[in-house]
Image (cartoon, rainbow, N blue to C red):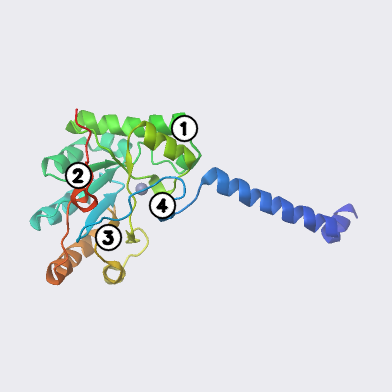
Amino acid sequence: MIAVYLLFSTEFWVWYAMGAIGLILIFVTAFGAFNINANWFVKSINRGEKKGIALTFDDGPDPKFTPEILKILDDHRIVGTFFVIGKKVESYPEILKEIEKRGHIIGNHSFSHSPTIPFFSKTKLEADITHCTNIIKTLTGRHTKLFRPPFGVTNPRYAKVMKSLDLLSIGWNVRSFDTILKDPKQLFSRIKNRLKDGSILLFHDTQEVTLQTLPKMIRYCEQEGIKILPLDQLINKPLYEKE
Ligand SMILES: [Zn+2]
């Protein structure tokens, strides 16, 4: 009887609605789930000022795809930027060294890339990011200033950590959706329709479809006279700390 009363009473629905709103507020505040382009909490660089575009690759190094992508970029004399995950670098240190040796740019994409990273305390977040910076530095001698937040999610703790570690948060303004779209034709047309001067493109060097689409995309840029620039040139910022 009490359950039936609760279900149909007006008070129950009022409490239910208030509870739902409360939960949504807690979720939004705790998660800080705002798109990187919104620049709500962290001022990210999401586009360049110059004519041309830049290619960025997240979530590697990957033993299957990163070397193939490096080959494509090198064949076209293009400098790409790789936002690497520290724990993957630990597994594949030679691939990171290869990225550096071939003159590509290395950025930090956290050590853990944990799904719960948006909930990390400031101390834990700072330790995670620093761990990745140190691994990159040990292997390549480079102290990278570039950081890309996992999942493009930021919150006020990121803002503090970016400042204390003197990092530049790098976003994108063309998301390829290469982790979702599996058809190279679809992926190419999505990118093509969004390209403009200053575009920073987000890819993942963990996907077959990226590998399949990249040569066609590069050829298209060459035909259209769209210059593919190194990220530092496009955004006109230094990449590495001077030691
Ligand atoms: Zn990622």
Check the picture and name the quadrant holding the C terminus. Answer: top left
Nearer to us: label 2 or label 4: 4
Name the amino acid, label 1. Answer: Lys
Q: Earlier in the sequence, mark 3 or mark 1?
A: 1
Residue 122 in view in this figure? yes
Gap between marks 2 and 4 measured at Cα: 21 Å
How far apart are the two marked residues, 2 and 3, measured between alpha carbons?
17 Å
Q: Which amino acid does label 2 sit on?
A: Ile
Seen at 37% across and 61% down, the residue is 180
> Is label 4 in a helix, a strand or a loop?
helix
Tell me the kind of residue under disc 3: Ser
Q: Distance between the residues labelled 4 and 1?
A: 19 Å
Q: What element carries label 2?
A: strand
**Position of residue 161 measured from the top left corner of the image (x, y, whole percent):** 40, 34
* Pick the front one: 91 or 97: 97
Pick the residue in front: 113 or 51: 51
- Residue picked out by circle 2: 105
> How far apart in space, not on screen, are marks 3 and 4 (Cα)?
15 Å
Give the alpha-carbon distance from disc 3 to disc 1, as whole Å: 31 Å
Instruction: First in sequence, mark 2 or 3: give its number.
Output: 2
Residue beneath label 3, please?
A: 199
| Residue picked out by circle 4 | 36
> Residue at coordinates 44% horizontally, 55% vertically from top-left?
38
Closer to the eye: label 2 or 3:
3
- Image quadrant occupied by the N terminus: bottom right
Image position, residue 37 (x, y; %):
40, 55
Instruction: Give the quadrant of residue 3.
Output: bottom right
Q: Earlier in the sequence, mark 3 or mark 4?
A: 4
Q: Is mark 1 on a helix, strand or loop?
A: helix
Mark 4: few, some, or many residues within 10 Å (few <14, many ≥20)? Answer: many
Q: Name the residue under label 1.
A: 122
